[in-house]
Image (cartoon, grey):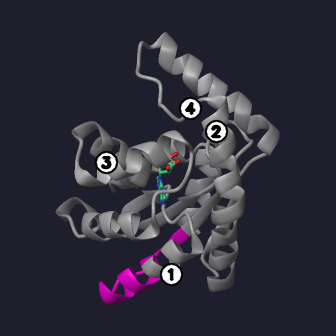
Amino acid sequence: MRLVFLGPPGAGKGTQSTRIQEKYKIPQLSTGDMLRAAVKAGTPIGLKAKAIMDAGGLVPDEVVVGIISERIDETDAKNGFILDGFPRTVKQAEALADILLQKKINLDAVIELKVDHGALIERIEKRVADAKAKGEAIRADDNPESFKKRLEAYHEQTAPVSAFYASTGELKAVDGMAPVDAVTAEIERLLAS
Ligand code: AMP
């Protein structure tokens, strides 16, 4: 099973892809997680990406395309994967199509979590409060200013990716405002059909 999860920051991509990963035993490949790990490790990519990420902008396409292309070659991704947070631009979606063609593999579905944008700020505030309560680190970009930038980047650069996958016939939309379990059930229903 090879999947892409699309949706704005705070839509529940991470939560839902973690659940689907457990059910199908395929890894969740989050470019955000990989970039945060690179920042933490102080790699050349991390050093380049940090300021962009903190400000809520998008890291250059070639950087994330390179990361994903290498990552899906790893053994644990041979039987499938969930892409979470990638592709985020039409250029990345086109590059992914080329990569998959070269590797002779196909996507099974692109799942878009549709959410009411007014609810997103509330969800991010809840994510910060939950992390604080658990004593976990707060993401440097989970602050109102960066979040506004991330939403702008989503509208300008990522929303067109949905149209791209609608045109290839791979897009499946899910109501991301439903309770978490109902969203998971709907995704599983779509994947089984
Ligand atoms: P996320 O964890 O998916 O919310 O990503 C956190 C941040 O990492 C984003 O705001 C971007 O700065 C960067 N990032 C993650 N994935 C991508 C991508 N596919 N293209 C460009 N930047 C990305």
Please state the horizontal and vertical placement of residue 31, each as a whole percent of the image.
Answer: 40, 54
- Residue designated by label 3: 46
Badge 1 vs badge 4, beta-carbon distance below 8 Å:
no
- Residue designated by label 2: 147
Q: Secondary structure at mark 2?
A: helix
**How far, Cα to Cα, is label 3 from label 2?**
20 Å
Which residue does the image show at 78% across and 44% down from the upper left? 117
Looking at the image, is 134 positioned above or below residue 27?
Answer: above
Badge 4 vs badge 2, beta-carbon distance below 8 Å:
yes
Amino acid at circle 1: Glu
| Numbered circle sitting on residue 94 | 1
Residue 80 visible in rendering: no
Badge 3 vs badge 1, beta-carbon distance below 8 Å:
no
**How far, Cα to Cα, is label 1 from label 2?**
26 Å
**How far, Cα to Cα, is label 4 from label 2?**
6 Å
Residue that lies at the very extreme toward the left in this rendered image? 75
Please state the horizontal and vertical placement of residue 76, each as a whole percent of the image.
Answer: 22, 59
**How far, Cα to Cα, is label 3 from label 1?**
24 Å
144 inside magenta stretch: no
| First-in-chain label (1 vs 2) | 1
| First-in-chain label (4 vs 3) | 3
Q: Is mark 4 within 8 Å of ligand 1?
A: no
Looking at the image, is 9 positioned above or below residue 27?
Answer: above
Report the span colored magenta.
96-109
Amino acid at circle 3: Gly
**How far, Cα to Cα, is label 4 from label 3?**
18 Å
Q: Count neighbours of disc 2 (C-alpha within 10 A) and say few if under 14, some if 14 to 19, many if 20 or more.
A: many
Q: Secondary structure at mark 4?
A: loop
- Residue designated by label 4: 142
Residue 6 figure quarter:
bottom right
